[in-house]
Amino acid sequence: MDRVEAYEPIILVGAGNLATRLGLRLAEKNIQVLQVYNRTPERASALASRIGAQPVADIRGIDPAGRLFILAVADQAVPELAAALTPLNAPERLFVHTSGSLPSTILAPAFSRYGVFYPLQTFTKNRTPDFDEIPVCVHAAAEADLRVLEALGQRVSRKIYRINDEERAAAHIAAVFANNFTNHLYGIAERLLAENGLPFDLIRPLILETALKVQSESPAPMQTGPARRNDRETIRRHLEALGRHPEWASLYRLITESIQHEDNRLH
C-alpha cells in the first residue's frame, strides 16, 4: 500500500461553528492542531484554549511547521484568505477548504497542493453532533493528497465519501433543500401556531416522524397531505386562511404545485 503523507500538525483557520466542532473533534481524537487562526484575537483564543492549540490573529504568526491547513471559514472569505496565505505555499503543505459549494480549484491560484474536506452537516453553537455519523466528503487535485484527506476523515468519522467538485455542489444543493428550506418552513409553522395561541410542541412529533420515515424509505412515496390527494377544497381554505400572509400563501401554492408535479411524474 502506498505511504500516506503526514497531515499533522494541523493549522485550523477559522473559529466559527464548523471550525469549533471540527477542532473539538480533532482534539477528541488526539489529532494535533498546532494553531487556530482568526483575525479576532478573542475568537482565536477561545477555540485554541479548548483544543490545546496556540491562538494566532496575525497571518505572519502562523507556524510554518503546519502540514495541513484547514480553511473552515465562510465561502466568501475563502478567496481573500487563500491569497493572504499564498506565501506559506510549499511542497510539504496541503491546503483545503470546508465548503460544500465552492470548487476545490478556487485554491489553485494560491497553492500547489489543495483539496476539500467537507463535513456534510448543519453546525450550531449549542449542539454537539455525533461526528461518527457525519458524512465527510473529500476531494483533492492529486491522488496522494486525496489519500491524506481520507486518512484524516477516517479518524473523525465512519462515513467518508470521495466526491468531486460537481458531485459536491449537487450534494450541497440537496442539503439546502433538506435542511435550510425545511427549517425555514418549521419557522413559518411556529409563527402560524403562535398567532393562533398554539405551541410548537403540537407538531414536533409530526416533524420527528417525517424525519424518521426517510431514514428507511424514499421520500416521494411517503408524501401525504392535500396536495398529494389533490384535495382542492382544503387547499382553497388553507390559502384563504393565509390571506394575511401573502408570502406564505405564495410559498404554499408553489410547494403544492411542486408536489403535484412530482406525483404526476411518478404516476
Image (cartoon, helix red, strand yellow):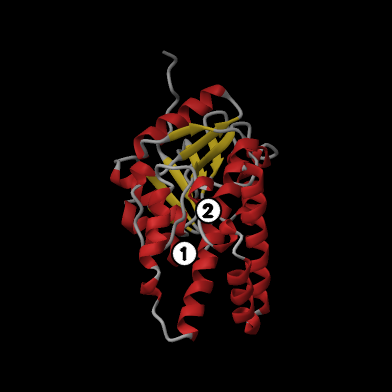
Q: Decide if residue 82 is on the left or right side of residue 18.
A: right
The span from disc 1 to disc 2 (Cα, nearest Å) is 35 Å
Q: Quadrant of residue 200?
A: bottom left
Across and down, in percent, residue 132 comes to 34, 42
Given residues 182 and 76, the one toward you in this image is 182
Q: Which residue is mark 1?
A: 41
Q: Residue at x 51, y 79 (%)?
A: 192
Given residues 243 and 7, the one toward you in this image is 243
Mark before the other along the chain sequence, 1 or 2: 1
Label 1: few (<14), some or many (≥20) within 10 Å?
A: some
Given residues 52 and 187, the one toward you in this image is 187
Dot 1 amino acid type = Pro
Q: Quadrant of the C terminus?
A: top right
Q: Which residue is mark 2?
A: 178
Question: SS at mark 2?
Answer: helix
Q: Quadrant of residue 2?
A: top left
Given residues 209 and 25, the one toward you in this image is 209
Label placed on residue 192: none
